[in-house]
């Protein structure tokens, strides 16, 4: 139920196990009582009140024997079941996972972390599968479940999906919204009849038929020994091993082998063996599922998070590993006959490795690879592919000359650094749009924004750092992967401390702990210098999120399909104690429950992340909608789009047109400001600008300042007032700077004149996106 045979690690934190057990028991009880789950787990375990007293959070409960009743009140079923399993020797409790102990620092104090884990005492491959599997029966379309002419407001007001009468844990596994805490993170679809468009998109996603690539699956089975020999598959016998049984034997061999003892520790060997066992179990499960579904048409589960991003669940779908993706092809296709060998060769080449352009990939496949296809080493040659199983499957289809199979091969195209693409749109930044392939490439090359950042960072670092020896060493060790790991999360609020820690982990052989902070500081200075527009927009949106949370309100985000509601609450730690009968000692487990106080810090950090992710989700939905109009097969996860060869060249152009249809970016930002800053005050005062008033004008500094000041609570301390003044000043400055970026640096007498300048700049930017010449790589293989 909780120890999956497909996971990479067979241990689970006891805190997670307690929460899962508690949640399952309460859901089961609710289903037995009412037939459906009416009350979310967050409210089921949070009926008590949390009150802050000084620096400590105390749980208040009336009645006698408060101490003895704490365990009963907080996760009684989860804690009781864990202790029951430990007493029956089904699981063992261990405090060390890695074999090493590291002293950690928190709030000025040093401590030894003590995490409690549960490990199964039996072969976990014997456990039944509890996963979301593909559906052989056609799912019911999502429609309104409201009576009469009443429109649905929330996703819970919709009816549809995979099961008409869910029982047990299936209700939560197949509901449309994936958020665990649906009281604080949800989607509002009550505006006009937008739910109908949302249902159309989701019905298409869950109704797209697929089937197993029988030709490739048979080849896999017939040549399993060769795949194992090449290292692409793990030996099947590993899947039946119990790590607890073989660990003692492995320790004995390790102690006897002097060479191995010098090369690696026992804990490293044990981790490697554990990973190989889990990988073998995963591969064995995928092969069994493929055999079970072979010959059937099936549909794949789809659901949304509270930002509207489309997710998949289970193990046999396109958001899984290479092996699972290679086994699935489209079913029931009505081909127009417009695909050719060229497109199939291009996609096959990009399964092998990345190229600077589609033409380079085609040239490699047509010349370099074809010269090897008659060689006996072709199998080992293909082993080096970036996605070896998909590469093999693609080649097998081409070799088969079966046009029905070839036309059903799925082609995956990913948006090129989608967060930076969206930022280039909001800033009308043509150079950044070119570097993210949003503007068609004139030289035919696929641009990579992180490669540009890497080269610019090296130049900046050498010029900026006083220690030239250190800058030279760091620049020689910097890679695209490390740069992406620093600057992509920086958009989403990555801190200096976290960046320094990543640099220390990657460059530990070359720099000290102190030097990692020096290098991280230079990275942040480079970010502020190189991307001042991004820094301005990020700061503006984060400040607005903080204002909403400080005024004790959720943050609202809107796209044409729906409105996202985000409401982060402070999580309060509570302790649960377990008695370990084997070692005769008590263990403490810390869990966190939601309080009634809003978390300003978490809201500040997360608002921009969710703002970008919701816009990203909207773009994906609109692309699906456009592909539906063409009658094209389409499947999407996040910003990955999967279709067939004949539609691969349509996808990038559709993606560009969807972004153009979003209109001037200032209108979107003004709507966000109105919903979270202005509208709450207008509702109280019953007077002021109406919704949509700022859709075609810049918000003046005086109006924005008035509504920001109106949000300040009464009777607050001087310290809090200073914080409010700082936030208000930050919003005013950031909004003024942002309008300079997107309208031009000039003083206009009226907000409408300034907005007309913004529209002119938007039209110029839009014309660059839609130009006919150049290669469209905004989404590519």
Image (tube, grey):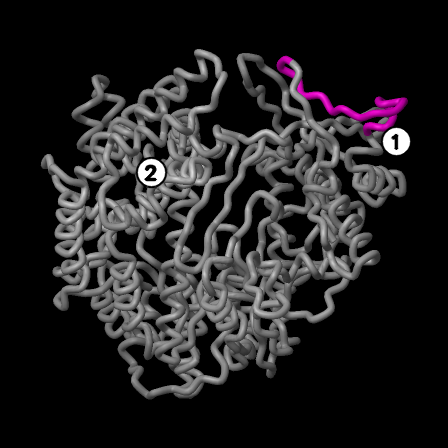
Depth check, mark 1 against mark 2: the one in front is 2
The answer to whether residue 422 is seen in the rendering is yes
Instruction: Relative to 98, say whether 557 is above or below.
Output: below
Q: Which residue is mark 1?
A: 581
> Which residue is labeled 2 in the image?
487
Left or right of 405 in this view: 228:
right
Residue span colored magenta: 54-70
* Residue drawn at point x = 46 percent, y = 58 percent: 191
Q: Secondary structure at mark 1?
A: loop
Q: Residue at x 16, y 25 (%)?
A: 463
**Magenta-span inclusion, residue 508:** no
Seen from the viewer's position, the closer of residues 467 and 485 is 485
Image quarter where the C terminus lies is: bottom left
CB under 8 Å between discs 1 and 2: no
How many labels were placed on the picture?
2
Q: Name the residue nearer the viewer: 237 or 542.
A: 542
The span from disc 1 to disc 2 (Cα, nearest Å) is: 48 Å
SS at mark 2? helix
């Amino acid at each position: 139920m909780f120890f999956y045979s497909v996971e990479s690690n067979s241990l689970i934190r006891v805190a997670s196990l307690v929460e899962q057990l508690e949640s399952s028991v309460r859901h089961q009880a609710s289903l037995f009582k009412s037939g459906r789950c009416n009350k979310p787990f967050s409210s089921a375990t949070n009926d008590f009140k949390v009150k802050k007293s000084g620096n400590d959070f105390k749980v208040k409960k009336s009645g006698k024997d408060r101490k003895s009743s704490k365990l009963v009140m907080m996760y009684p079923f989860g804690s009781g079941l864990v202790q029951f399993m430990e007493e029956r020797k089904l699981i063992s409790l261990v405090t060390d996972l890695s074999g090493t102990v590291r002293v950690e620092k928190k709030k000025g104090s040093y401590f030894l972390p003590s995490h409690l884990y549960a490990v199964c005492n039996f072969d976990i491959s014997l456990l039944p599968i509890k996963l979301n599997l593909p559906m052989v029966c056609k799912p019911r379309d999502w429609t309104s479940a409201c009576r009469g002419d009443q429109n649905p407001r929330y996703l819970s007001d919709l009816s549809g999906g995979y099961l008409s009468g869910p029982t047990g844990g299936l209700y939560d596994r197949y509901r449309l919204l994936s958020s665990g805490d649906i009281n604080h993170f949800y989607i509002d679809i009550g505006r006009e009849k937008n739910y109908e468009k949302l249902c159309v998109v989701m019905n298409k996603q869950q109704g797209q038929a697929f089937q197993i690539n029988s030709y490739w699956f048979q080849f896999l089975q017939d040549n399993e020994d060769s795949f194992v020999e090449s290292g692409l598959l793990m030996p099947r016998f590993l899947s039946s091993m119990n790590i607890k049984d073989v660990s003692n034997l492995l320790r004995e061999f390790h102690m006897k082998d002097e060479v191995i003892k010098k090369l690696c520790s026992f804990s490293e060997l044990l981790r490697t063996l554990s990973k190989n066992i889990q990988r073998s179990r995963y591969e064995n499960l995928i092969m069994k599922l493929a055999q079970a579904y072979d010959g059937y048409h099936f549909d794949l589960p789809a659901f949304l998070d509270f930002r509207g991003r489309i997710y998949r669940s289970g193990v046999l779908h396109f958001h899984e590993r290479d092996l699972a993706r290679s086994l699935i092809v489209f079913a029931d296709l009505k081909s127009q006959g417009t695909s050719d060998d060229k497109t199939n060769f291009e996609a096959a080449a990009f399964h092998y490795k990345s190229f600077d352009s589609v033409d380079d990939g085609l040239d490699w496949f047509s010349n370099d690879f074809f010269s090897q296809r008659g060689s006996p080493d072709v199998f080992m040659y293909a082993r080096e592919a970036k996605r070896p199983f998909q590469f093999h499957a693609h080649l097998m289809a081409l070799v088969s000359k079966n046009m029905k199979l070839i036309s059903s091969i799925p082609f995956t195209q990913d948006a090129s650094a989608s967060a930076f693409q969206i930022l280039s749109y909001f800033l009308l930044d043509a150079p950044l749009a070119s570097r993210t392939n949003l503007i068609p490439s004139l030289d035919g090359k696929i641009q990579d924004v992180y490669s540009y950042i890497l080269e610019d960072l090296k130049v900046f670092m050498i010029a900026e750092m006083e220690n030239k020896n250190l800058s030279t060493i760091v620049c020689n060790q910097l890679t695209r992967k490390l740069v992406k790991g620093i600057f992509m999360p920086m958009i989403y609020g990555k801190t200096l401390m976290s960046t320094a820690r990543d640099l220390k982990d990657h460059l530990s052989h070359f720099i000290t702990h102190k030097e990692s902070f020096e290098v991280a500081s230079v990275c942040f200075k480079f970010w502020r210098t190189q991307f001042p527009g991004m820094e301005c927009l990020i700061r503006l949106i984060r400040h607005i999120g903080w204002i909403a949370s400080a005024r004790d309100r959720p943050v609202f985000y809107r796209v044409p399909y729906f409105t996202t509601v985000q409401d982060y609450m402070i999580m309060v730690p509570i302790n649960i104690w377990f008695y370990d009968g084997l070692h005769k000692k008590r263990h403490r487990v810390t869990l966190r429950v939601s309080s009634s106080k809003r978390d300003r810090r978490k809201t500040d950090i997360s608002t921009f992340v969710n703002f970008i992710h919701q816009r990203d989700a909207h773009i994906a939905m609109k692309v699906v909608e456009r592909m539906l109009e063409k009658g094209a097969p389409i499947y999407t996860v996040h910003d990955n789009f999967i279709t067939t060869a004949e539609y691969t060249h349509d996808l990038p152009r559709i993606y560009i047109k969807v972004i153009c249809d979003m209109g001037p970016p200032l209108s979107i930002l003004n709507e966000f400001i109105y919903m979270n800053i202005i509208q709450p005050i207008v509702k109280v005062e019953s007077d002021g600008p109406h919704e949509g008033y700022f859709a075609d004008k810049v918000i003046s500094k005086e109006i924005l300042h008035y509504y920001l000041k109106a949000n300040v609570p009464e009777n607050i301390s001087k310290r809090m007032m200073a914080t409010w003044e700082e936030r208000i000043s930050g919003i005013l400055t950031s909004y003024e700077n942002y309008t300079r970026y997107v309208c031009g640096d000039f003083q206009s007498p009226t907000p409408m004149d300034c907005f007309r300048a913004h529209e002119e700049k938007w039209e110029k930017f839009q014309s660059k996106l839609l130009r006919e010449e150049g290669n469209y790589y905004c989404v590519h293989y």
